[in-house]
Image (cartoon, rainbow, N blue to C red):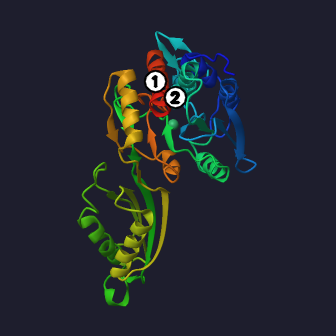
Amino acid sequence: MIRAVSTDPVPIAQALIRCPSVTPADEGALDVVQRLLEPLGFDCTRLVFGPEDYRVDNLFARRGGEGPHVCYCGHTDVVPPGNLAAWTDDPFAGVVRDGVLYGRGACDMKGGIAAFVAGLADYLAVHPGHRGSISLLITGDEEARSVDGTARVLEWMAANGHIPDMALVGEPTSRSTLGDTIKIGRRGSLNAHITVTGVQGHSAYPAKADNPIHRLVAALGPLLAAPLDNGSDFFPPTTLQVTGFDVGNTATNVIPAVAKAMLNIRFNNHHTSAALTERLHAALRAAGCSYDLVAECSGESFLTRPGPFVDALSRAIERSTGVVPALDTGGGTSDARFIARYCPVAEFGAVGATLHQVNESAPVDELRRLAGTYREVLAELLG
Ligand SMILES: [Zn+2]
């Protein structure tokens, strides 16, 4: 049985903002969501992960057991408010003034979660006998470590037969107008720390030393001389930036023993972090370096190619906002990188103009149109 749940996202967003859920605190935010979903027929499971000093609460909720299975994904945790004196209002008060909702998370992404719930309630009121199933994956660990959130919930979902057929992340993706941008992929990011060891010596007698700076420069040269690729259908070219270079030497007549560099590579779908790491090893070996390389990937690149899912999303956005969305892969990483390992995933949400800022806000009219879009997405995918 479906009990009436507000189809207006604004009071829901206010209730969420009033829970000061700075990662990893929850402060009742997931309870707000769960209390709204249960009357809509969702089975709710709370999944608590993480060490004693960093407990993270997560929510998985599902309505129906059949396919196709559509999952809406997001987070209720927020970044800290920062300089409180700079805020016009209490960042956790959820004030609405002149048609704008203010508060930490209004945009990223309690407004999006509220739009999910309101859109769902609206959809179910009209389509109580829809086909397939609907789920929500709501984490409390997106803004900080992102270890005990979406990634762990997905492992649990895989073990319990809940992997969806497609997933929509409600992060704020619109650039200037609601509806103008869908993210269908993200670049990957690889950080590398390189230490080259040589033999210290007098610069007047270089034959008795082995200069690690020369070897490191020789290794980096070919990596910087040419682009790693020319981009792909939906991605710009991969970029490699040397973000640190350090020998700790203050004497002009001493060849130092050690030279260090840091790199950050933002890579498209032509690469994997493993292949790029091997490329760094090869460059260091080719320059005859005695070296240590520590590479860490904060996210592989992924791409959900345009097809029925992305098309349905585009139609729903155009119908509810009047805007034809562009398909984009820009920006940093998001939790979608974890979901992409399991199923097609895209991201669509509000205009991200004030995310993480002082006086973070969302126009109430935009939140209502966003809820309408999330309702139309379900109508497209589940009839
Ligand atoms: Zn976010």
Instruction: Name the residue located 46 percent from the left edge and 9 percent from the top edge.
Output: 98
Instruction: Tell me whether the residue at label 2 lies in contact with that at label 1, contact meaning CB atoms closer than 8 angstroms.
Output: yes
Left or right of 60 on screen, residue 337: left
Amino acid under disc 1? Leu
Where does residue 143 sit, x and y in percent of width and height?
56, 41
Instruction: Name the residue located 58 percent from the left edge and 47 percent from the top edge.
Output: 163
Find the distance from the CA under tag 2 to the CA under tag 1.
8 Å
Where does residue 216 sit, x and y in percent of width and height?
35, 73
Where does residue 224 sit, x and y in percent of width and height?
28, 65
Instruction: Name the residue located 65 percent from the left edge and 36 percent from the top edge.
Output: 61
Disc 1 target residue: 370
Disc 2 target residue: 112
The answer to whether the residue bearing label 2 lies less than 8 angstroms from the nearest atom of ligand 1 is: yes
Quarter of the rendering containing residue 259: bottom left
Q: Considering only order in the chain, which callout, 1 or 2, is on the residue closer to the N terminus?
A: 2
Considering depth in this image, is 85 or 202 the residue closer to the camera? 85
Left or right of 227 on screen, residue 157: right
Considering depth in this image, is 297 or 378 the residue closer to the camera? 378
Quarter of the rendering containing residue 182: top left
Amino acid under disc 2? Gly
- Secondary structure under the numbered disc 2 in the rendered image: helix
Left or right of 316 on screen, residue 378: right
Where does residue 242 sit, x and y in percent of width and height?
35, 60
